[in-house]
Amino acid sequence: MPDRKGDKPLVTEKKISRRTLLAGAATAAVVLAQTASGKSFQAALTKSELHLLEDPTKVPGVPPGTLGTRSPFEKPAKAPSDISSRTPLQDLFGTITPSDLHFERNHNGVPAIDPAKYELVIHGMVDKPMVFTLADLKRFPSVSRIAFLECSGNYRSAADGKITPQQICGLTSQSEWTGVKLSTLFREVGVSPKSTWFLAEGGDAAVMTRSVPVAKGWEDAIVCYAQNGEAIRPEQGYPVRLFLPGWEGNINVKWLRRIELSDQPFQTRQETSKYTEAIGGGKIRQFSFTIDARSIITYPSYPQKVERGWIEIRGIAWSGRGKVVRVEVSTDAGKTWKPAELQEPVMDKAHTVFRYLWNWNGQLTEILSRTVDETGYTQPFLKELMAARGGNMGYHFNPVTAWYIQKDGQVLFKAT
Amino acid sequence: MFCQKVRSMQENMTKSGIFIGAFCLLFSISLTAHKTLTSAQNGSQADTLDYPRTFGFGRAATLEEIALLDTDVRPDGKGLPAGSGKVADGKLVYAAKCSGCHGVTGVEGPNDALVTVKNPADQKTKARSKTIGNYWPYATTVFDYIKRAMPFNQPGSLTDQDVYNLTAFLLHENGLIKPDEVINAQTLPKVIMPARDFFVPDDRQDGPEIR
């Protein structure tokens, strides 16, 4: 306990409440401490020091600070590997992913870029090759859009069913993205009408490159500098990233430093060796940008245990082709399907929350969700998808996922 | 003391509240006077037509600064630098700078296999093997990628000469060129890549069909 100017803190060690013990996993918390002379200060307390007072109505709370904090009782966490880190879908509510929980996929780490030195070069088949600083980009008319971003390699399963939504498909997240429309920059540099593809290049250690059809640039591409109201996080491309609504994560090049207009694709490693999928008959599908419609029930899900009685089944549904028009839920292992309620506003190319109220009778069953988007596409079962792709799995894998509910209430993943 | 602080803060807030209120009022008046407000629905792009021809933000890029960044190589060879590479020389660079992560013969790992194993005894190797020899559709990608991203722990450290040599070596190990073939801006785009014919553009149509 910090002791300022010899004052003895009033917070004493004696009372350790049940709640304190429950919060035992807390590593640090910010609390208001008060000295004997009545001075109050914010103190970061470590695990052993964290003992919340029995009754918060009997002591003044923490005064306003310069940054908000997450309650020490809440510990949502991304699940990192060497190359990516997954969003804890089962711990979230609504549709906006808190920026520090947005999934990550990098090809050689997160670079440190000084915004004062940042420049975006646009050249190639243009009238005026140009350089834009971050300040320049912010002066252009801006646009904001709420949309999901999903890595196209986003399906995992586990034979024993012990797998969370985060592990199954945690490489999808949603933010409000703000920036300048790429079309605005295209007009500024005078993109040649003969240009059909452009190269987007990142300023990271992988100097990541992808070829993008120019038509997408005119349609709805955004050169983003903000995410959920503040500057983009380094993990998401600080200071500037490309955002292509509805398209696979990898092509939304982060740390964007260069755009080169061309009349053919560049055939970069990330669009040949990777991010291409075998579809049977010896064929490999390339430039498959759009994310197909998908949904997943995030509650109840593994590792949760449920009790008999009313359960609000909750989840998210999305499509890279447009709006989700319907989500259907089955609580009898797929025999019958009922429409779930969609939370308004249902947005284009955005995670949409669905809910279905269910009274569980305590018997073994399976619950499933499937979504239909505005193009009439229905999320397929795993078997259908495998059949359509010549028995192959791989990128753009969006099968219906089932949750098996045991008699004891334990929820387990089940492949369809 | 704490209470005093709170009181003065409240006073401050009230003052700035009034200020913000007045500001908003002025702002909304000026907006309505300007023109009818249009709303942009979740990022819609239709509202750019009345933009000026140019905003005049940003500056012209010089040829020199573009050349510094523009190292990409297209399948037709555009972007390839001067110089050439040999298989034997590439073997030496590979042993020194790449074998630690990709294996002595390019198949042992621990990172990505770079060489296609012909008729593997272990069927699992076959199933896993997506390599330059059996999966990469364009030889130019080998040069472009090595130059920009490898070695992983020292990206951007190779000379064009190193990259040409390494490209020749890897193409040879994958059975795509003969041991004495020289790789340069003219020969590299012409290397025949067996995987080229497998690649098809996205065949999904925006409709009900599962593909």
Image (spheres, coloured by chain):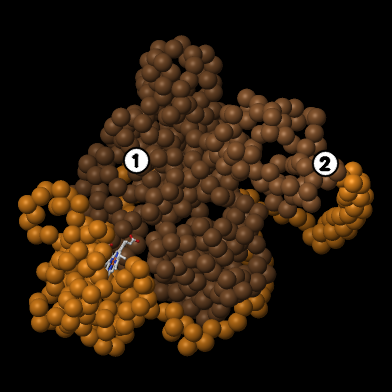
Q: Which mark is residue A156?
A: 1
Residue shown at the point (63%, 65%) measured from the top left: B49
Q: Earlier in the sequence, mark 2 or mark 1?
A: 2
Residues under numbered marks 2 and 1 in contact, where contact means CB atoms less than 8 Å apart: no
Are the numbered discs 2 and 1 placed on the same chain, yes or no? yes
Q: Which mark is residue A36?
A: 2
Element under label 2?
A: loop
Give the class, few, some or many, for how many residues have Cα within 10 Å of label 2's Cα (few <14, many ≥20).
few
| Residue plotted at (56% across, 45% down) | A97
> Residue at position x 41%, y 15% from top?
A408
Q: Chain of mark 2?
A: A
Q: Nearer the viewer, residue B25 or A88?
A: A88
**Given the image, on which type of amino acid does mark 2 rest?**
Ala
Q: Which chain is brown?
A: A
Furthest toward the front, the residue is A6
Q: Secondary structure at mark 1?
A: loop
Q: Give the quarter of the image for residue B138.
A: bottom left
- The amino acid marked with disc number 1 is Arg
Q: Please give the letter of the chain rendered in orange.
A: B
- The mark lying in front, picked from 2 and 1, is 2
